[in-house]
Each structure stands twice: as structure tokens, then as C-alpha cells.
Amino acid sequence: MRGNLAIAVLGLAPLTGGCLAKTALDVATAPVRVVSQGADWATTSQEESDRNRGREMRRREARVGDLQRDYEKQAERCERGRQDACREAIAIRREIDAELNEPLR
């Protein structure tokens, strides 16, 4: 009985050898893959950085454009003699300057 079992195990060994070797390789390289994936998640590629910078620039340009239109409306009202519009125009101008002077993230 043992002889037959030994022959069967030896006969199956070449068939499972590749599976065992692959499993051993997968187990051995798993920590490296986990660390590599973690590093990939933790860092930003140049392409991602460029994309984010472009998005931030477009957001800022849109915000400054909106503020500029509001400023022009208030400045026109100020020229017509409305003091509250003059104060509002000054506040908007300061906001535009702050937006333009803030560094991009």
C-alpha cells in the first residue's frame, strides 16, 4: 500500500512542481509588491502633478474672471457716486490681488 502511495506521489510531483514553485515565488515576492504599491499610492507622478496644476490654474482663472466682472460693476456704480459700491470695489480688488499672489498648490 505504501509503495503504491509513494509511486503515486512521485508520479504527481512533476505535475505539481510548477504550481508549488509559482506559489513559493508569489509568497516570496508579495512583500515587495505590497511595498511597491504603497509607494505608488504615496507618491504623485509628474503627469498627475501637471494635471493637478493645470486644474488649479483653470480654477483660479475662473475665480479671478468672476471677481473682475464684479469689480467692474462696482467700479461703474462708484463712478456714479455710490459710496457703498466704492467700498465693495476696493474689497473685490483686494480679493483679486490675494488670489493672484497666492502660490499654486
Image (spheres, rainbow, N blue to C red):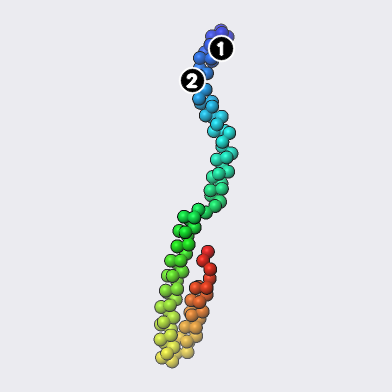
Taking 103 as reference, is 29 above or below it? above
The location of residue 102, given as percent across then percent down, is 53, 71
| Observer-nearest of 46 and 34 | 46
Could you give the CA–CA distance between mark 2 and mark 1, rounded to whole angstroms? 15 Å
The dot on residue 53 is none
Q: Of helix, strand and loop, which one carries label 2? A: helix
Quarter residue 29 falls in: top right
Q: Residues within 10 Å of mark 2 (few under 14, many from 20)?
A: few
Q: Is residue 4 left or right of residue 65?
A: right
Q: Is residue 65 left or right of residue 6?
A: left
The location of residue 2, given as percent across then percent down, is 58, 9
Residue drawn at x 42%, y 70% as measured from the top left: 62
> Mark 2: which amino acid?
Leu
Quarter residue 81 falls in: bottom left
Quarter of the figure with the N terminus: top right
Taking 99 as reference, is 86 above or below it? below
Q: State the residue position of label 2.
A: 15
Residue drawn at x 52%, y 73% as measured from the top left: 101
Q: State the residue position of label 1.
A: 6
Residues tagged 2 and 1 counted as in contact (Cβ below 8 A): no
> Mark 1: which amino acid?
Ala
The location of residue 36, given as percent across then percent down, is 55, 44
Residue depth check, mark 2 versus mark 1: number of the one nearer the observer: 2
The location of residue 54, given as percent across then percent down, is 45, 62
Does label 2 or label 1 sit earlier along the sequence? 1
